[in-house]
Structure formats: structure tokens, C-alpha cells
Amino acid sequence: MSRSILKAGLLFVIISLFLNNTFAKRVADKTYVSECASCHLAYPSDFLPKRSWKKMMKGLKNHFGDNAELDKAEHKYILDFLVKNAAEGSTNKRAVKILRYMDKGKTPLRISKLKYILKKHDDLSDKHIKNNPKVKTLSNCKVCHREAEKGLFDDDDVVIPNFGKWDD
């Protein structure tokens, strides 16, 4: 009996490490990080579907009010990376849920406006985000999610500035 429990536990650990490592790879591309994280968090590519990344990359001249244009080679490389690692091809549970909550046929561009992301943050009020001078917006993920730059958004690791560890 104890041998079966040990085998099951080991299998669980191996699968968990694989899934976490697979997810973390989605933000580990050096070119993507160097270009995109110079202005904001290099969001995990599986937070959006292919159609969203394609549309976003077409509009870099006005990327949420900033000119984020790239040279042709970097543009192609980053677009290919994002499309290859978009939500549709991900086994990560968060990416699957993001797609499940997404309106069919829509092409979202703002991760902070995705239904799944809004649902995950619905316990938070304006005092935690909008009126919190250290947070200001849901798009400022890495302020509260300390492992966000590694692509990890575990609820247990959330620390909200001026409020401390989040305990829902």
C-alpha cells in the first residue's frame, strides 16, 4: 500500500514539474523578453489566442498609446514565438480556462480585460488596485504576483502592496 502511495506521489510531482516548466517556457524566450519586458511584463504567450497575438503584432505602431515597432526580423521572430505558444496549443490549466471564458469569435488584446482574469480578481476592490498607488491597474501583474516574470501566478504567492499577503 505505501509503495503505491509513493509511486502516485512521485508521478504527481513529475507531472506538476513538467506542467510548471512548460508554462514557464512561455515567457523564457530571450528576444521576446528583451523587447517586450523593456516596457511591461512579458506576459505568458498562452494568455491570449493566436488571433490576438497576430492582431497585436500588426498594431505595434500604436501599442496601447506607445510606438513599439520592431525591425522585420525581430517582428517575425516574436510573432512566430507568440503564435506557436498561444493559448490554443497550451496544456496549462490557466490557458485552458482563459479560452473557456473567452467569447467565441472575439479577439481580445488586453489581458487585464479577459473574463477569466477579471473573475480571478473579483474579490479585490478599487482600494486594492485602482486607488492603490503601487498597483493602479490589473495589467501591473508583477507588483502583486511576485513570480509573474517567471510565468507563475499562484494565488498563494500574491502580496498586495499596502495590504500584505492575499488570503481569499
Image (cartoon, rainbow, N blue to C red):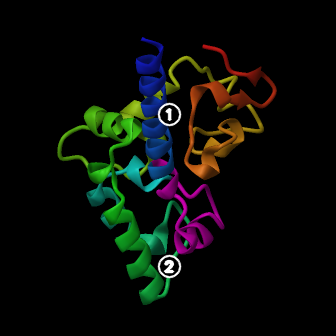
What SS does tag 2 mark? loop
Residue shown at the point (47%, 14%) measured from the top left = 2
Give the answer, above or below, for where 156 lies relative to 26: above
Residue beneath disc 2: 69
Q: Is residue 26 magenta?
A: yes
| Magenta-tinted stretch | 23-43
Q: Quadrant of the C terminus?
A: top right
Residue shown at the point (35%, 73%) measured from the top left = 80
Q: Quadrant of residue 45?
A: bottom left
Who comes first in sequence, dot 1 or dot 2?
Answer: 1
Give the answer, above or below, for where 34 lies relative to 13: below
Q: Nearer the viewer, residue 24 or 32?
A: 24
Q: Is residue 158 left or right of residue 155?
A: right
Q: Amino acid at mark 2?
A: Glu
Q: What x and y, as percent, mark residue 132? A: 74, 31
What SS does tag 1 mark? helix
Q: Quadrant of the N terminus?
A: top left
Q: Quadrant of residue 66?
A: bottom right
Q: What x and y, as percent, mark residue 143? A: 71, 41
Residue shown at the point (47%, 39%) measured from the top left = 14
Give the answer, above or below, for where 42 lies relative to 67: above
Distance CA(mark 1)–CA(mark 2): 42 Å
Indicate which label's residue lies in the foreground, 1 or 2: 1
* Crowdedness near tag 1: few (<14), some (14–19) or many (≥20) residues, C-alpha within 10 Å: few
Q: Amino acid at mark 1?
A: Val
Q: From where the camera sits, is residue 90 visible?
A: yes
Asked if the residue at tag 2 contacts the one at tag 1, i.e. Cβ–Cβ closer than 8 Å, the answer is no
- Mark number displayed over residue 13: 1
Q: How many marks?
A: 2
Q: What x and y, as percent, mark residue 167? A: 66, 15
